[in-house]
Image (cartoon, grey):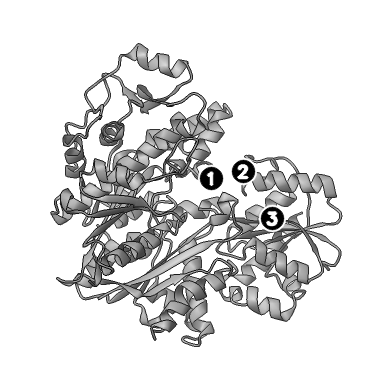
Amino acid sequence: MVPALRAASNVLVHVPDLVRYGSKPWRENSGGDAALAGALSRRLRSFAEAVAYPPNQVFIGNMAPGDLGEGPSPWYENPVPEASAKGAFGEILPQEDFYPLLEAADQFGLLLFGPDAPSGADAASAAAASLLEGSGPGKTGPGKRGREEEILGRIESGEALPLHRGGDLIGCVRRDHEADESLDARILLENLAAKASGAYALRHLLLQEEIAPEEIEYVISCSEEAVGDRYNRGGGNLAKAIAEMAGCAGAAGVDVKSFCAAPVYALVHAAALIRAGVVKNAVVVGGGSLAKLGMKAYFHIEKEMPVLEDVLGGIAFLLGSEGGGAPRVNLEITGHHGAGRPSTPQVMAEALVRDPLERAGRKICDIDKYAVELHNPEVTLPAGAGDVAATNYRTIAAMAVMKGEIAREEIPAFIESKGMPGFAPTQGHIPAGVPYLGHALVGMRAGDLRSTMVLAKGSLFLGRMSQQADGASVVVEV
Amino acid sequence: MFKGKKVIALGERDGVPGPAIAECMEAAGAEVVFQKTECFV
Amino acid sequence: MDLENQAAIKKIADEVGADNLVVVLGMPGEGLRLAAETLTTGDPSWAGPLAGVSLGLPVYHILEERVRNHVPEDIYAEKLQMMEMVLDLPRIESDLAELRAAG
């Protein structure tokens, strides 16, 4: 079977009161700096502000990536008028409806909410509402409430962390073992957040395409969390937990990991399984990264900007067989970076872009759009982290110059035509090229786009096991 | 200029990574005492 | 700049002494100024071990002309040449010149 990309879904979950549990704010605040904690809470955005934020509107498909370049900046000061939380291929969920999803994701009584916690009964999102309807075995589920003294007791004993709505305490999340740091309260909250946002993205995809969850045969998670206890930290299979929560009762699940490059590997693996006839369809899913919330918040605060890293991202892609105009995932053009090769951007660009295209007899300029790591530059620039997408586009353009496809003066025009501004939240694996796929499907259905190469890199050196970076690429085309 | 100097090589994934800086500096006659690659995202 | 790296560099500077020590950076853009400032006058974000610590280390970028001229041609071609087109060389030169003038 020829594997094809059949659908894409990008979701965001606005969680201002979980920003404090991002790795950076958590570390800063544990130092006991009350002024810093206060500054953080004053700079958090409302749900309406997060919805009207232009890059978020691009992420869920209500605007094209190119619209960002043409619109006024800074984006955070130029909200989209009458912005909707529902997009062409995604949506934005408020925190109020995410707490119940977290509760539904919890099968071990890790969370305890008080009587005032949201139940999700009025959730505007059909995907969230449907996840709350279908309860799995062992689920504690929304509706069972703890007493206030019980919640306070857990927090005071040091076994649980408080969960808030603005200034109000509404519940807590507890550790599940006194001496196992892998089952620490914050780690478990991280894992539950990835599971719940991943299941939300997957259910949104299924509803959008009107596919019954039972039809899905295989789920690959490209999420970054290290799920497991102390004997198998990172043991994983968040995929199966996500599939179960989303109601994909017959689906097998497995995690694919390579830091931020994982989503591209996951696409390639899913397509390969379909081509080999192992399964007829597969879903690639990524849940959000709690650890990355507020990572650059203190730079934003210093520059009197809102805290822009206040959303969890979720992505889901349905792969099946060719037909009905769905673009194929072209496994003849996949790029990998050899384990012994230098991790310089040049070698990476050769491995991910030049070599696979050359093998297929194509030129760099033959690809209509390159989808690189699409980190929102408005988040990264104030922190001195550069414009990741722009740097990657310059690298691809430089490779085209070295191959003699374009002249050095044509670099800006190449980038203008084949690139786009970054629009994804800085959630590690979420920006990994793949958030463009929803836009690519729209463009391909309209006949405006023929091909895109998705490529992403992973910073393996962060784990201290290798000095290497990694990368993967694949072409999706009609 | 770098001969006999001790060098700290601090690279970035999308710029010039640490090991590449280290190799260049060693070739320029320096002793690399620390090399690291940063990733800001 | 990464807090662990700040700590590691501070330790090396304390052990080796600043006299014979040189820092060579490879950041693509805006991170360069921040890193250079951190290693000379101290961490401007006041978050890391180098907050308020003025190491005063000589800081270079690998693609500055005066640095890349010391790299043998074959290694230069393999590791750096393409990055000339990717990174903003005039800006790297002017950012570092400015910091040196201020320091």
In space, the residues marked 2 and 1 are separated at their CA atoms by: 8 Å
Q: Is residue A124 visible?
A: no
- Indicate the secondary structure of the residue bearing disc 1: helix
Q: Quadrant of residue A376?
A: bottom left
Marking on residue C36? 3
* Circle on res. C45: 2
Please report the residue visible at 30 percent of the width from the left and 45 percent of the height from the top. A240
Q: Subunit of mark 3?
A: C
| Distance in Å between CA atoms under marks 3 and 2 | 13 Å
Q: Answer with left or right where residue B18 lies relative to residue A317.
A: right
The image's mark for residue A299 is 1
Q: Pointers 2 and 1 in contact (CB under 8 A)?
A: yes
Return the disc, 3 or 2, that comes first in the chain's sequence.
3
Is A400 placed left or right of C69 in the picture? left
Answer whether residue B41 is visible to the viewer in this image.
yes
Image location of residue A95, percent across then percent down: 30, 36
Query: Do callouts 3 and 2 point to residues on the same chain?
Result: yes
Q: CA distance from mark 3 to mark 1?
A: 17 Å
Residue C82 sits above or below residue A372 on the image: below
- The residue drawn where x is 83% and y is 46% is C15
Please provide percent x and percent y for residue C26.
Answer: 64, 63
Kindly indicate whether the residues beneath marks 2 and 1 are on one polypeptide chain: no
Same-chain check, marks 3 and 1: no
